[in-house]
Image (spheres, grey):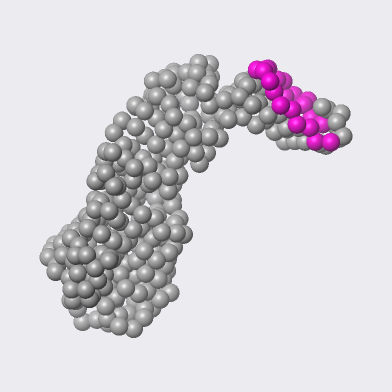
Amino acid sequence: MKNATEDVTITLTTDMELNLNGLVNKNGKKITINTVGNRVVATGTKDASVTINSEATVTMSSKTIYVPMTGLATEIKNATENATVKVTEDWTVNASAISTTKTITIDSNGKIITVHGTLPATVNVTSKAKTVSGDTSYYAIFTDALKLASESEEAAVVKLYDNVSLSSNVTISNRNGKSITIDGNNKQYTITTKVTNTLCVEHNSTVTLKDLKLKHEAKQGTVMVKETSVLNLQNVDIDAKNIASYQYGLINLFGKDGTPKNMTLNMTDVTVDMDGTTTSGSDNAIVRTGNGGTNGVKTVTITLTNCSLNTGSASNVNGIRIQSTTTADVTLTNTNITTKNLRAGFTW
């Protein structure tokens, strides 16, 4: 192995202990070790030319243990030192199976880690987002976390642990009729929406966006409600200053297919700041009730409390626009609407 004149691949058939010190090819060739479900306890310092492929690793100060996913919980529970764990596959575990007095950090590495029950205080899972449904937590990237929330049979909360950038449309809905909350973790994190109507609320859902920042960079809306649904925005800052040519509605109660809809929009402690130029016409708005005509027939309830809607330098934009075939009940409390060149911030 050390004297090989070509790259070397080793496939293990049994567990082993391995001293990595000095494990390097003299001819500069690569060494790859495939554990194939076997357990390897490695000590020493691994050279950059050496790769050990394993489903999971448990790294301690004195050693690194390469293990299959089936043995990972046991390694964590029996850890003799604080450790960092990294997985390469999705993993499901009962919290009680990884109870330990050692401090364990588990890197989800873009995979879905499902934990049933409450994690021990000494164990932490790092991920971009976490979905909580009942007594089960799913640690995942945002889009996977949202998909898990859509499949939940209980009310689900998706909490952010990193900024999110979305370059394609994302549906937020729960076909079981359960609510979905997206929590920005006390406004620590921002969802950047880069395409028209990025966040689409559908299927008679109740969706809450709370304690987060939205940054919108597309021509049309950041949030669209497509069907009979409830959208709640709570303590949300919306930055729409980076739009070249704004059109229609930033928050759009759209409806579709000509069937009358009933929609509710509740906004509390929401700040919207716009900028840029817009197309001609006067039916653009920060909050807009979709299109007129028979395809846009709907009944909406809009409630704004402690909100500020500011169109900035964007021309031809209303604060709220109620279309001709919309029946609307609108309540504004302690709310300011500032527009550039329209006489009223509220039109219908």
Q: Note whether 170 is above or below 175 in the view shown.
A: below
Q: Is residue 9 magenta?
A: yes
Q: Considering the image in quadrants, where does the N terminus appear?
A: top right
Q: Which residues are magenta?
A: 6-25
Viewer-closest of 276 and 290: 290
Residue sitting at x 79%, y 32%: 8
Q: Note whether 92 is above or below 248 in the view shown.
A: above
Q: Considering the image in quadrants, where does the C terminus appear?
A: bottom left
Residue 189 is left or right of residue 85, and the answer is left
Viewer-closest of 110 and 259: 259
Q: Which image quadrant is residue 138 in?
A: top left
Residue sitting at x 22%, y 65%: 259
Spot occupied by residue 273 in the image (x, y as percentages of width and height): 32, 67
Can residue 124 be seen from the camera position used here?
no
Spot occupied by residue 16 in the image (x, y as percentages of width and height): 67, 17
Spot occupied by residue 249 in the image (x, y as percentages of width and height): 30, 70
**SS majority, magenta:** loop
Spot occupied by residue 78 in the image (x, y as percentages of width and height): 50, 16
Residue sitting at x 39%, y 24%: 95
Q: Note whether 195 is above or below 153 in the view shown.
A: below
Residue 111 is left or right of residue 265, and the answer is right
Counting the numbered discs, the total is 0
Viewer-closest of 168 and 256: 256
Q: Is residue 80 magenta?
A: no
Residue sitting at x 45%, y 34%: 113
Can residue 73 be seen from the camera position used here?
yes
Q: Note whether 23 is above or below 211 in the view shown.
A: above
Residue 55 is left or right of residue 220, and the answer is right
